[in-house]
């Protein structure tokens, strides 16, 4: 599997990760057929935002409802590891449902994409996927 994302969207998300550090940034990825068309930053409501993230349930429920009403499709999530590698943590694995959605992990400079699956290669939850960063004019993340 491959995840395509525009360089503009990825650059916006990396900038967000740098601005939010040392706290983790997070949000939703929208698109289809393995292509990110937009991203929405959400509030991180985790108790310890320095080491964990939790997407604000209000934003997640609103996006799920919009998707059911023919709005943009949620294809996954993004979050940052401000002082770490762009690989899923044990906590990420414990929080992830094996629903096939994408987890884009950024750290302000690097990025990697993972698919949340049953019996994945990483912590039995995530399989690595190819990240294809495309140069696309005019696309930005919805912050």
Image (cartoon, grey):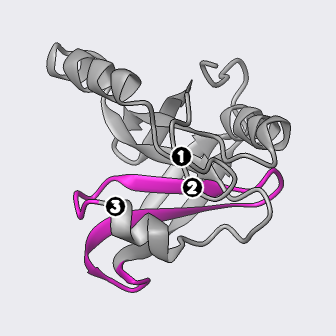
Which x, y percent locates residue 101? 33, 53
* Residue 44, placed above or below residue 71: below
Disc marking residue 96? 3
Image depth: mark 2 or mark 1 in front = 1
Q: Which residues are magenta?
A: 97-124
Secondary structure beneath label 1? loop
* Residues at circles 2 and 1 in contact by the CB criterion of under 8 Å: yes
Front disc: 1 or 3? 1
Q: CA distance from mark 2 to mark 1?
A: 8 Å
In this image, 62 relative to 52: left or right? left
Q: Earlier in the sequence, mark 1 or mark 3?
A: 1
Residue at the location (81% across, 36% down)?
15
In this figure, which residue is indicated by the disc labeled 2?
A: 52
Q: How many marks?
A: 3
Mark toward the viewer: 2 or 3: 2
Which sits earlier in the primary sequence, circle 2 or circle 3? 2
Along the line of sight, which residue is nearer the eye, 42 or 12?
42
Residue annotated with mark 1:
47
Seen as rendered, the residue at the extreme front is 47
**Height in image: 121 above or below 111?**
below
């Amino acid at each position: 599997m491959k995840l395509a994302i525009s360089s503009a969207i990825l650059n916006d998300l990396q900038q967000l990760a740098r601005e939010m550090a040392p706290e983790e940034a997070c949000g939703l990825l929208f698109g289809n057929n393995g292509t990110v068309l937009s991203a929405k930053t959400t509030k991180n409501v985790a108790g310890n935002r320095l080491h964990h993230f939790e997407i604000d349930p209000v934003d997640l429920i609103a996006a799920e409802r919009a998707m059911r009403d023919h709005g943009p499709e949620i294809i996954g999530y993004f979050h940052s590891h401000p002082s770490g590698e762009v690989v899923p943590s044990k906590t990420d694995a414990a929080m992830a449902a094996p629903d096939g959605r994408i987890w884009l992990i950024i750290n302000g400079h690097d990025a990697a994409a993972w698919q949340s699956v049953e019996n994945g290669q990483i912590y039995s939850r995530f399989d690595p996927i190819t990240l294809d960063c495309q140069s696309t004019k005019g696309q930005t993340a919805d912050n």
